[in-house]
Image (spheres, rainbow, N blue to C red):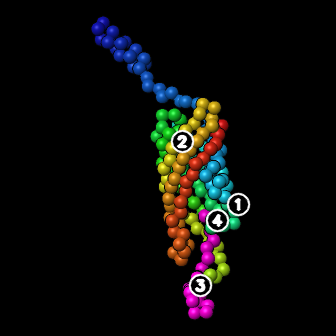
Amino acid sequence: MKKLLLLLCLTVFTFGYSQEKTVIDFPKNEIKGNALFLVAGALEVTYEHLINEESGIGVSLFVPYVSDVSEKFNLTPFYRFYFGKKPAAGFFVEGFGMLNSYKYFTYNGMDYSNGLPLGLMYNDKVNRTDFALGFGLGAKWVTRKGFLFEINGGVGRNLFNSSDTDYQIVGRGGITLGYRF
């Protein structure tokens, strides 16, 4: 009888004890614009899809609208891992790849017209396209209504055409405003 009672108690305790992780339902898409670059003369728009409460993947498109910016465009896919208490918010680290196109000027040396150094003699501008890999850090704050504010920064290195130019290191960053839906 004692064995039967013990078996019954163990069976009840086994079925009564469970650890289910509660799944939080939250919007999984974000669209953002970089306010810092907008003031500086370029447009950067970002879409991010949140995989779960701790990670997301996305892509950014950077296009300048003033002519004195050396970059022609950047297309940047990224992966982020979040460390905050809210879903996909708080401090994050990211890894990114960046397809970038830029222009630069080559020069032949100093201009010695009339025997005086007047400055560098520039050739035509040269256009290059390269791919960079890098990492970044940042933080994201989200309101209950879905509006978000983000600060981020990162650095990467061009892999292919940067040996003959000064564009070996690329930067990524901004002050971003957006909406989660």
Earlier sequence position, callout 3 versus callout 2: 3
Residue contact between numbered discs 1 and 2, judged by CB atoms under 8 Å: no
Per the image, the residue denoted by label 4 is 69
Residue 108 visible in this rendered orientation of the protein: no
Name the image quarter holding the N terminus. Answer: top left
What is the distance, in whole Å, between disc 4 and disc 1 at their CAs?
A: 8 Å
In the picture as drawn, the residue positioned furthest to the left comes out as: 2
Residue contact between numbered discs 3 and 2, judged by CB atoms under 8 Å: no
Total of numbered circles in the picture? 4
Per the image, the residue denoted by label 2 is 140
Q: Is 115 situated left or right of 92 in this image? A: right
What is the distance, in whole Å, between disc 3 and disc 2 at their CAs?
A: 49 Å
What span is in magenta? 100-119
| Relative vertical location of residue 34 with respect to residue 116 in this rendering, above or below | above
Q: Where residue 143 is drawn, which disc sits there?
A: none
Q: Dot 1: within a 10 Å radius of its alpha carbon, few (fewer than 14), some, or many (20 or more) residues?
A: few
Residue sitting at x 30%, y 11%: 3
Secondary structure of the residue carrying numbered label 3: loop
Per the image, the residue denoted by label 3 is 118
Give 180 or 131, whichever is nearer the viewer.
Answer: 180
Per the image, the residue denoted by label 1 is 65
Name the image quarter holding the C terminus. Answer: top right
Residue 67 visible in this rendered orientation of the protein: yes
Instruction: From the image, state whether disc 4 or disc 3 is nearer to you.
Output: 3
Amino acid beneath label 2: Lys
Amino acid beneath label 1: Tyr
Earlier sequence position, callout 1 versus callout 3: 1
Amino acid beneath label 4: Val
